[in-house]
Image (tube, rainbow, N blue to C red):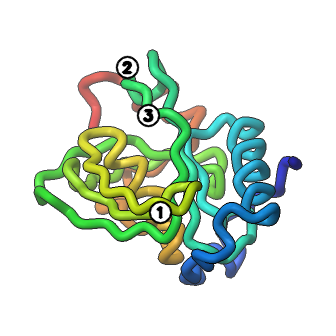
Amino acid sequence: MAIQPILRMGHPNLRTEASDYPVDQIGTDAFSMLIENMRDTLKDAGGIGLAAPQIDVPFRVVIIDIPEGKSRYGVLSALGFTVLINPVITVLDESTAGFWEGCLSVPGLRGYVERPQSIKVSYLDDQGQTIEHEFMGFPATVVQHELDHLAGRLYIDHIKDTTLLSFEAEFDRYLAEPSRP
């Protein structure tokens, strides 16, 4: 297990569509090492989600680990450590809500992004089992943010109003008010 460098905005591999992870490789030592490296990297960076392309692995693999409690996103319900392999998303309801998103590949910035808040994702878990799971609210936003990385997109691509893009220090000072979008 090892902490991996996280690619930053501007690296061309962040804008490349990832390939499906070979199903016959799930459960191998190489797969286990990938998941351990992603988990160690996520923990070290203090994030809640990481896609394999962010550590320069061009496969459709995402991990998410949302802790329960108060955070910069408000009070969160826990979504335990989850591995999504070759995920396919379906929007269940087009109704959106917005959150100030950040990204380990876009350090130091926050941007206000609106996304659908009711989705279903079909994926393989780390045991190779097919899972269908519905995500609502903030977890739906996190899943969509991470799945964007698999398609070569970043959250900044979804910002409709560029005045709602800020450095984190200025966000904390001027924008992190409950009444602000």
For label 1, the SS is strand
Marks 1 and 3, Cα distance to the nearest angstrom?
Answer: 17 Å
Q: Position of residue 19 (x, y in %)?
A: 58, 83
Q: Is residue 43 above or below residue 133?
A: above
Relative depth, front residue between 71 and 38: 38
According to the image, label 1 marks what residue? Answer: 124
Does residue 113 appear left or right of residue 165 in this picture?
Answer: left
Query: Horizontal and vertical percent for residue 82?
Result: 51, 45
Q: Quick one: SS at disc 3? A: strand
Q: Is residue 25 left or right of residue 155?
A: right
On screen, residue 164 versus residue 173, left or right, reads left
User: Measuring 63% from the left and 76% from the top, which residue is drawn there?
Assistant: 24
On residue 43, the disc is none
Kind of residue at badge 2: Val
Q: Which mark is residue 79?
A: 3
Residue at image point 24% right, 42% down: 136
**Residue receiving disc 2:** 75
Circle 2 sits in a helix, a strand or a loop, which is it? Answer: strand
* Side (left or right) of 126 relative to 171: right
Name the residue located 80 percent from the left edge and 56 percent from the top edge: 33
Q: In front: 132, or 54?
A: 132
Amino acid at circle 1: Leu
Please identify, in this view, whether the residue under mark 1 or under mark 2 is nearer the observer. 1
